[in-house]
Image (cartoon, rainbow, N blue to C red):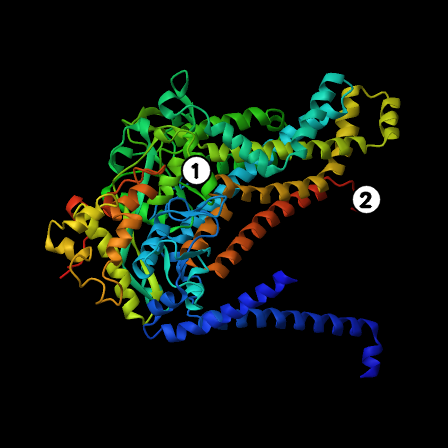
Amino acid sequence: MKTILKNSRTRNRFIQGTVLVVTLGILLTFVLTTRHNLLEQGIATGFGFLERSTGWPINFSLFEVTANSPYADILLAGLLNTLLVGVLGISLATVIGVIVGLMRISDNFVLNLVGTTFVEVFRNVPLILQVFVWYAVLTHLPSPRQAISVFDVGYISNRGLIVPSLDMSALDIILFFIGLGLAGYAIAAAGKTNETLKRHAWSAFGAVCIVLFLILLFSGRSADAPLVNIPELRGLRFVGGIAIKPEFTALLFSIAVFGGAYVGEIVRGGFLSVDKGKIEAARGLGMTAFMVNRFVRIPLAVRAILPALTNQFIWLMKATTLGIAIGYPDYFMIVSTSINQSGQTIELIALLMAGFLLINYVLGFTMNWINKRLALKGQAS
Amino acid sequence: MMKRFTSALAGAALAAAVSAPVLAASGETVKTIQDRDSLLCTGHNGSYLGFAEVDDKGKWTGFDIEFCKALATAILGSPDKLQIIPVSWAQRFPALQSGDIDVIIKVTGWTMGRDTELGLQFARPYFIGPTNILTRAELGATSAADLEGGVFCINAGTSIERIVADYMGAKGISYEALNFEKAEELRSALYAGRCDALAGFGPFLAATRFNAPNPDDFVILDEVLALEPEGIAARQGDDNFIDVINWMVSALLMAEEHGITQANVDEMRANPPSSSIGRLLGATPGIGDRLGLSNDWAYNMIKAVGNYGEIYDRTVGEGSPYKLPRGLNNLWSKGGLHYTLVLD
């Protein structure tokens, strides 16, 4: 026995195994004790409630959800709402961040001042306050009856921005993007061997884009339905078109602007981290300013930016939970309301954690994958 | 030091009071109140607008407080023989069971769980709590159907969400539910015009309207989506006390039905227009001794606080800032749900 324990490898394995068993044992005890206590109090456990209808509706979802929909549907709608505002918010934040970051490192005094002011203002005001401010601004727009008309096809009111919609279902739109992804991948793959296709890759992609769009637009529609659905005021609301709700817009704006300020600083840091010697060396080789940026500065800066950016993206995704403050039915708000209405606290908290874990894990995994692809070969990362 | 000593004394007194209800449970609550010469009644931790409001001098007013005064007058002859004990919503039941208060008059819904598991006994409902709709006056809506397609602001995670969904679903009215977690956000969304209407507990809507930048911009529709009867609750097992409360509520309603007000009660007593009014006001005996009270308790009570309608108007109705319509809280003869018991 002693001799076995003297072997450091065996000993380490033994210790690790013991720790693992004890941890699992503690977790199992927690689960069993909770279950026992809940049963004792006559509280129902399990996920059977997911099939029961909720009895309450939400006002914003990507697919139709009514008061008769089961909890599973409304939770999925909430998850999609979180993804929608999160993905769009992060994309906008990145665009804003890159612009602001470049302004901050520019030699132009005015651009520099604007960038600095933007960062200082939006980084230093708490996010929830910004959400409230944007929401207050949007809800104090005129009522639907006095809506601001945009060429009589779009309307801006305190019910949001109403724009004409195409006669396409949500499924059509999803198919469109899946098709685009596949086409892009196919063109890129074929372009590796086919020189002509490589040269005209963007034109080919554009052509596929238009054809796919037209097929989806004209397929499976009734003959008399208009191609474009123009909103009109009927009673208290606009009928037709797509309404972009103020709750969504306020949350999106806040995440984009607040995130933009942080991303801007990350971008600035990335560019400043590029070694001056390397830039000078590139110039010394006779590269033009464009070439220096394209082949030396940007590739090096992006590598410095990515790890910090991953953190920021995950942070912003979690910030979507502020939707609850202004009535945006994101995943957190739906779970919170479901807890009140169904009483299935532990199951719903577990689903809440699993949902965010999944979203953020996928986000982190993708970013790390990109990071690895970009990392300089042979460099330890 | 002195303060600590007195609080210790108060603690001891409290401990004595806690043991007292064991006796009171056998029908002695009224006797306990008479021996103490003071009624311990529920207030609120802060102000619950319209029902239990406290001003900066510690003076209590409101619908529930008026009923506390009425009960104190019925049992002890004076509305001043009353102590309002501030308790929160959650504290009210343990406070009653431990004897810190004699009775709960605190818009308390009569539910099966409270009636059975919590060991309470409810007297007849004294207030009907409706779920109403508060809407913008400029929309000109007179019923929920006029709000077809409108946005309804609703408190997330409450029973109101389901009540509205059921009601509108049954009537085939489409609407958009905008749910907020906090009452403050709910109110500001309505004030800003983000929603066309706010659905909720009637008195809450009345307070929301009153707190609006311009209350005249908002109206509460008469339509009732659902209702909850609010009862006065006492400890289980004191039948005599429940009798007193039932007849107190009934006497206030009877006074309104017969047009007896705070102003004309003396005249009515001197010259009762009917024999039942004579019995009610104690001109002929019977109303008091059968309950173990003085025969003029109803007269004293009406003299002190007025009839049911007067209390309502003064605290939550037309005479108050909240202008809550009588609606179902009117007498049956005027379209409401309240009726009197038979005084023989």
Q: Could you tell me the amino acid type at mark 1?
A: Arg
Q: Which residue is mark 2?
A: A379
Residue A186 at what x, y percent from top left?
Answer: 56, 36
Q: Residue furthest left?
A: B274
Judging depth in this view, the residue of B141 and A80 nearest the camera is B141
Please check whether the numbered discs 1 and 2 fall on a single chain.
no
**Is residue A55 at all visible to an observer of this figure?**
no
Q: What is the chain identity of the residue bearing mark 2?
A: A
Q: Which residue is mark 1?
A: B187
Left or right, B246 with reference to B159: left
Q: Residues within 10 Å of mark 1 (few under 14, many from 20)?
A: many
Judging depth in this view, the residue of A123 and A184 nearest the camera is A123
Residue at x 87% of width, y 23% of height: A285
**Is residue B52 at all visible to an observer of this figure?**
yes
Q: Secondary structure at mark 2?
A: loop
Q: Could you tell me the amino acid type at mark 2?
A: Gln
Q: Residue furthest top?
A: A151
Q: Quadrant of residue A298?
A: top right
Residue B309 at what x, y percent from top left?
Answer: 25, 45
Q: Nearer the viewer, mark 1 or mark 2?
A: 1
Q: Secondary structure at mark 1?
A: helix
Residue at x 34% of width, y 50% of height: B66
Rendered position, B230 above or below A293: below
Residue B154 at what x, y percent from top left?
Answer: 39, 43
Residue A133 at what x, y percent from top left?
Answer: 55, 31
Judging depth in this view, the residue of A120 and A81 nearest the camera is A120
Could you tell me how far apart the alpha carbons at marks 1 and 2 are, in whole angstroms? Answer: 58 Å
